[in-house]
Amino acid sequence: MELADFLGLVHPVIAVFFVFPLIGIVVNYAWATRQRRLQAKSGDKSKIPASSGVEHKKLGSWLTGAIVGLVLIGLAYPIGKNLITNQVWGKAPFQVIFILLMFPATIASLVFLYRANTKLWRAVFATLTGAGLIILGFQDGVFRRDNEWYWSHYYIGMAAAMLMIFSLAIVPEIYKDKSHRWRLIHTVLNCLALVLFLGQSMTGTRDLLEIPLSWQEPYIYKCDFVNKTCPVPPTSLK
């Protein structure tokens, strides 16, 4: 395995080792928080600790940052590989500079989203964070599977990331809203995000099986992926 192949594994390794376990922990705290709230509403004394809600909020915020970071890592690999392979710096240096600046700009927008106190600024920085991911996602080199967008690791991942960014932006509104409308929106959207994460685990595994190693690429990419055929190598003369 060459260095380029090893770097391609950074994204799935972080997802399996850190992000997906964190999703499980956040879901567990979310369920505990809801159960405690329902028990308190019915007048029963709950054995679930009151800290479950605080932990859910804290770890949920971490999860949003982890998802955005994971998406950026997943985009950095194919974009960087394309820039190096096609020597884009010599052809379009300003494009390279723009792409390189978009990564820290997206991270900075997320940091400001964490720190924003007013609804307006949360909306602004949430929009900028999402826009940064989308702009980077449509750069050359990123495999999007546009013909099967409904079963694309890229599009499902982007949708999940947008839901997580929005969920982070509305957290203060959840605690202010006495009608619990924002709490319901938060619950519904995160249930949808959980389904998308399940899709990510399936499509990510599929894509790992389909991505060839560096030394295999010249032959594999000659295949007809629509008709599922590959050129037959010439038989060697005896």
Image (cartoon, rainbow, N blue to C red):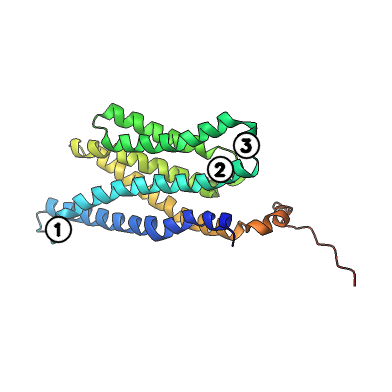
Q: Quadrant of the C terminus?
A: bottom right
Which dot marks residue 88? 3
Q: Which residue is mark 2?
A: 79
Q: Mark 3 belongs to which amino acid?
A: Val
Quarter of the rendering containing residue 126: top left
Place of residue 138 in the rendered image (x, y in percent of width and height, measured from the top left): 55, 37
Residue lying at the far top of the rendered structure: 120
Residue at 70%, 51% (x, y): give it. 226
Residue under pointer 1: 49
Q: Of label 1 and label 2, which has the lower sequence position?
A: 1
Left or right of 203 on screen, residue 166: left
Query: Which one is closest to the eye, mark 2 or mark 3?
Result: 3
Which residue sits furthest front?
90
Classify mark 2: residues with Cα within 10 Å, few (<14), some (14-19) or many (20+): many
Q: Which amino acid does the dot numbered 2 rest on?
A: Ile
For the residues labelled 2 and 3, the Cα–Cα distance comes to 11 Å
The quadrant in which residue 104 appears is top left
- Regarding mark 3 in the picture, which secondary structure is present there? helix
Q: Is residue 138 visible?
A: yes
Which residue is located at x 38 percent, y 42 percent? 163
**For mark 3, does the 10 Å Cα neighbourhood hold few (<14), some (14 to 19), or many (20 or more) residues?**
some
Local secondary structure at mark 1:
loop
Q: CA distance from mark 3 to mark 1?
A: 55 Å
Total labels drawn: 3
Q: Nearer the viewer, residue 173 or 185?
A: 173
Other residues around mark 1 within 10 Å, as few (<14) / some (14–19) / many (≥20): few
